[in-house]
Amino acid sequence: MNANTHTPGPWHTKPETDYVPAQVWADGMNVADVYGGSRDVRKANARLIAAAPELLQSANEMLACLSFIEPNAMRAQVMLRAQTAIAKAQGKV
């Protein structure tokens, strides 16, 4: 999967009911049903999933900004974590 194949954001949550799991929706489509754990955990997981498009965009923007900062150990660690997360989101790891 590359950066352009996921459902475009924004994504939003729909609350769980007694008959429907917590859900994440985008552009009128169900992106994810969220199962497992307690109702509070499912709600929190749905919020995290719904934030994914913005988090991915922010991580890419952060990497671009960090490239202008003088190299040091902290910068290297942060860049590696961001690059790894972006690769995971893009299906590269």
Image: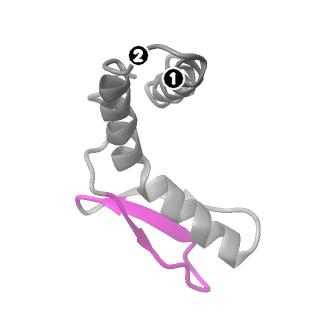
Q: Which residue is drawn at 36% across and 33% down?
A: 62
Residue 82 placement, left or right of 8? right
Neighbourhood count class around disc 2 (C-alpha, 10 Å): few under 14, some 14–19, many 20 upward:
few
Q: Which amino acid does label 1 sit on?
A: Arg
The residue closer to the viewer here, 79 or 93, is: 79
Type of colouring: one colour
Q: Does the magenta stretch include residue 69?
A: no
Read off the residue under disc 1. 75
Q: Position of residue 89 (x, y in %)?
A: 47, 31
**Alpha carbon separation for disc pair 1 and 2:** 8 Å
In the displayed structure, would residue 33 be above or below residue 66?
Answer: below
Q: Please report the residue visible at 55 percent of the width from the left and 79 percent of the height from the top.
A: 16
Secondary element type, mark 2 = loop
Q: Which mark is residue 70?
A: 2
Considering only vertical position in the picture, is 78 above or below 26? above
| Quadrant holding the N terminus | top left
Instruction: Tell me where the magenta segment starts and ends, as one range.
Output: 11-27
* Image coordinates for residue 15, horizontal then vertical, percent: 49, 79
Judging depth in this view, the residue of 15 and 82 nearest the camera is 82
Q: Residue type at mark 2?
A: Glu
